[in-house]
Image (spheres, rainbow, N blue to C red):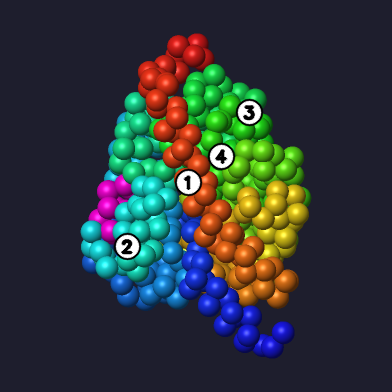
Amino acid sequence: MDGDVPLERARELLAAHPVVDGHNDLPWALREQVRYDLTARDIATDLTGLLHTDLPRLRAGGVGAQFWSVYVKSSLAGDAAVTACLEQIDAVRQLAARYPGDLALARTADEVEAARASGRIASLMGAEGGHSIGNSLGTLRGLYELGVRYLTLTHNDTTDWADSATDAPRHGGLTAFGEQVVREMNRCGMLVDLSHVAADTMRDALRVTRAPVLFSHSSARAVCDHPRNVPDDVLAALPGNGGVAMATFVPKFILPAAVEWTRRADANMRAHGHDPLDTTPAGMAVQRAFEEAHPRPRATPATVADHLDHMREVAGIDHLGIGGDFDGTAFLPDGLDSVAGYPNLVAELLSRRWSEADLAKLTWHNPLRVLRDAESVARDLRATTAPSNATLAELDG
């Protein structure tokens, strides 16, 4: 295939079938860098070198809808976690109000479609980490009413009711209260996000849920053996559930050679007094110095495409999506180093003979179907099921 032809075709395809990206941490980056001062980080301008995300690059990348992560670090707990989550939600609302010609808040699949029809980027929200609900189903419902449309059941640490992929297991998956959280999410219409959770938590959630699940930013464990990725038996269960796994771009999750390098880079960050997830300019200066002394293995769009090829083979094309994790990671693949990079991934998949119909499902149709199916399940459940007021103490003792 001729040099620039796949990239040209990729841009044309994204104009017709834009990306619904499952996970972007811009709100947390704005909190950490400028405490939500949107004048200091005007995303209407090119913010290369400061952020992975701005409006010009979202447009260049062919993004039609974005799940903004209203992430809260898991060192926060209880009321502090809930407050921080509310502040993150407020940040997304501030962004939409400041840039009304470019961003439109969306709560439903129909509102996503309407935003696209008006030439704007649909802005959805996903809460990353079950600690954000403070062990309260009422708080969960409150987040839904504020527009949150998925909850990642854990972040990096195990919660009181769900095991994380990157922490010591305490529950063997979900507790009884954790199962009730999943049921209440189904009743509300909030997607159950299984990125970050332990494999047993994934399996428990698939057993309990009545609605399709989401992996907002996870890739294939068979391709890169990292606990943040999805095992093949779980991928194979997605057709029966209807859910979607959205491949991530984070090198330490997709490139085996990057796993050990990242372990050493994380240790270096801690030695310099930084959290490994710190992407502020000060934190990135430490990372860049380490990278200069110890060159890192480089992922590329082909690395991501290898995961998508495997995920398509195991789960089927109807159960794939994209969740880049921009502004939530220090390093990204070459060619996917900002939200402008999606055409490079689509071009790679075109070079691998992915059809336009399959790519349209990957970028746009699959995530919209899952959102719409969750809405349908919620309508049925709300007609027959009252809100649950169960507590952690009642169910788990």
Q: CA distance from mark 1 to mark 2?
A: 19 Å
Crowd around label 3: few <14 · some 14–19 · many ≥20 (10 Å):
few
Q: Residue at x 50, y 11 (%)?
A: 397
Q: Amino acid at mark 3?
A: Arg
Q: Secondary structure at mark 2?
A: strand
Q: Secondary structure at mark 1?
A: helix
Q: Residue at x 67, y 68 (%)?
A: 355
Image quadrant in which you'd find residue 190? top left
Question: Can residue 293 be found in the magenta stretch?
Answer: no
Counting residues from the start of the chain, the first of labels 3 and 1 encountered is 3
Q: Verify CB contact (< 8 Å) between mark 3 and mark 4.
A: no
Counting residues from the start of the chain, the first of labels 3 and 4 encountered is 3
Q: Is residue 184 left or right of residue 106?
A: right
Between disc 4 and disc 2, the foreground one is: 4
Q: Amino acid at mark 4?
A: Pro
- Visible residue check, residue 55: yes
Q: CA distance from mark 1 to mark 4?
A: 8 Å
Q: Which residue is mark 1?
A: 371
Crowd around label 2: few <14 · some 14–19 · many ≥20 (10 Å):
many
Counting residues from the start of the chain, the first of labels 4 and 2 encountered is 2
Residue 75 horizontal/vertical position (percent): 44, 38
Q: Residue at x 49, y 66 (%)?
A: 18
Between disc 3 and disc 1, the foreground one is: 1
Front residue (pair 298, 360): 360
Q: Which residue is mark 3?
A: 207
Q: Start and end of the magenta stretch? A: 88-96
Q: CA distance from mark 3 to mark 1?
A: 19 Å
Q: Secondary structure at mark 3?
A: helix
Determine the main secondary structure of the stretch shown in magenta.
helix
Q: Which residue is mark 4?
A: 212
